[in-house]
Image (tube, rainbow, N blue to C red):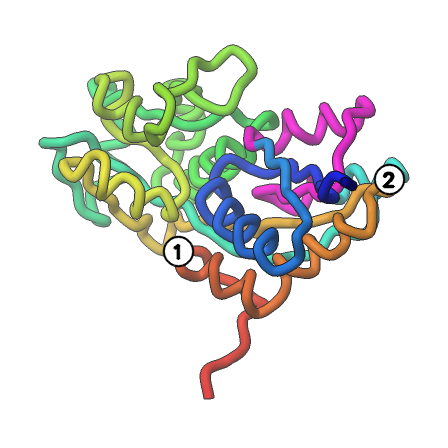
Amino acid sequence: MTAPASVSLHAAGSLRGALLDIAETFQSETGVLVSAQFGASGLLRDRLARGETGAVFASANLEHPQALARAGLAGPAVLFARNELCAFLRPGLVATSANLLDLMLDPKVRLGTSTPKADPSGDYAFAVFARAEAVKPGAKAALEAKALKLTGGPECLPAPEGLNVYGHKLASGEADIFLAYCTNAQQLAKEQPGIAMLRLPDQLAVGADYGLTVLNKASPGGYRLAMYILSPQGQSILTRHGFLAPGRPRAG
């Protein structure tokens, strides 16, 4: 008996829930198995650039899949989802959009981010710091200096299996505020209901464009998976997980 075809998917950790749901539906409809690996997009890009076998790469930014395309390792990068950064507050910490920046700058408040360059979430957090400079001169340098890079880097400790890493860092006391993707809210509401989410004020708001590419050595199943992620079915699943899906058809 011939073994079922399989496709290797490398994807940003923030996509885990959505892409596992998409993979399950894709497998049931096509019979093509999906082997998924999740992690910081920059680290995944480096692994693929060094020759690790992969078919589809779904990144939390467009830059990393574009880098593989420029290196001649993958096809064009396409936008398939959008996210944005929010502030998550440890239980008992109260903030509003009006005083969030002051709280982030408070020397007593531990501010957590992911690791820039290794993880786009960290890059987006530092983009928030750059926007803060226009609101309060000196804020950029102060925030960059105090930011605790707790996730996304090769040396960062992961959360226990099955737990949201940002909720774990907040609940364990490693951070008082964590800048992370707003799509974490669904999982955190189940795991850590005491953690509050606050959308960033317009002056600080930073959006995230997610990019998808197919590696040159991908099988036909890899292209089918990529198209499924871009299809109305895949885009609807992304929407259910809190992402903005640019390819989802308009209602009516």
Q: Residues within 10 Å of mark 1 (few under 14, many from 20)?
A: some
Which one is earlier in the sequence, the residue at label 1 or at label 2?
2
Q: Amino acid at mark 2?
A: Lys
Disc 1 and disc 2: Cα gap in Å?
Answer: 32 Å
Is residue 46 found inside the magenta-colored segment of the image? yes
For the image, the number of numbered tags is 2
Local packing at callout 2 (Cα closer than 10 Å; few below 14, some 14-19, many 20+) is: few
Looking at the picture, how far across and down is residue 105, in whole percent?
A: 28, 28
In magenta, the rendered stretch is 38-64
Quadrant for residue 145, please give it: top left
Q: Judge from the rendering whether residue 29 lies leftward or rightward of residue 15; answer left or right.
A: right
Q: Does 110 sit left or right of 42 as displayed? A: left
In the rendered structure, the answer to whether residue 223 lies left or right of residue 158 reads right
Q: Residue placed farthest to the top in the image?
A: 155
Q: Position of residue 213 (x, y in %)?
A: 73, 48
Per the image, is 50 magenta? Answer: yes
Q: Which residue is mark 1?
A: 242
